Image (cartoon, helix red, strand yellow):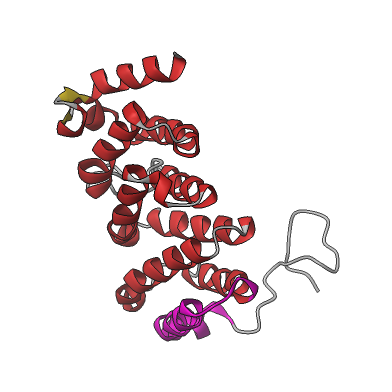
Amino acid sequence: GGEGGGGGGGEDDEGDDRLLPLEAIRPHVSDILAGLCSLLSSATEDSALITLEGVHHVVSIGDVPEALATIPVVAREVLQALCRCHGDIMIADEAIETLSFLSRRDSCRAIVEEACAPLVVDVVRCPDKYVATLVESIITLLSSVIRPPPPSSTSAAPTSGVLVSQVFPELMAAMLHTRSEDLLQPGCDCLRAYLRAAKDEVLSRRLESCGGREGAEAYQAAATRLMA
């Protein structure tokens, strides 16, 4: 058959070959996510990837208002799976991609930011407490979450909450003082992401974590340090 229009077709054409149509799944999204989160909470590296892929597929179905109450649990369990299985790059990538995807949805953005902020702050304050692969994964996650939303988004800025008020000052302080190479390189990407997403906010913000400097001055100091 083939409703898959453009491209070469073939046996592996993913097209729309689902066991159930989306409309049959939508009423059960909340229950499906709850079940997947339960599985994810005890998943080993052997089963975490396929479970994370399942979570990602379900949240990709679209905005389901009835499932919104489940998103904080989804964010928490995906973060915990990332922390447990950070040594597996495929698991780390899938976890980051899932949270990044959710953060693009207006109804979920604040939930994802609130879930990520405490872990990110702890990592930038004490990177030596964490193994190198996890530091890199968490800072990469931050960078992916703070990138600007697509033009169709109704949100004025993706980082109007805790990512600016709590995470940005701690990240900037770390970039001025840390010796952790695992943090410095991905941290540069984060600083660029903040400029793209909330330039006026971060440049004018007074940072007590950086000796009372304004953001613009702190950026200059960070750049000077990194180029030294």
Q: Quadrant of the N terminus?
A: bottom right
- In the rendered view, does 90 fall on the left or right side of 170? right
Q: Main secondary structure of the magenta part?
A: helix
Q: Is residue 62 visible?
A: no
- In the rendered view, does 158 fall on the left or right side of 80? left
- In the rendered view, does 181 fall on the left or right side of 177? right
Which of the pair 123/38 is nearer the observer? 123
Which of the pair 203/47 is nearer the observer? 47
Quarter of the rendering containing residue 203: top left
Q: Identify the magenta region.
A: 21-46
- Place of residue 37 in the rendered image (x, y in percent of width and height, measured from the top left): 45, 78
- Compared with residue 199, is residue 144 higher up or lower down, i.e. above or below? below
Magenta residue check for 29: yes
Residue drawn at x 18%, y 23% is 214
- Place of residue 226 in the rendered image (x, y in percent of width and height, measured from the top left): 43, 20
Q: Quadrant of the C terminus?
A: top left
Which of the pair 217/132 is nearer the observer? 132
Quarter of the rendering containing residue 219: top left
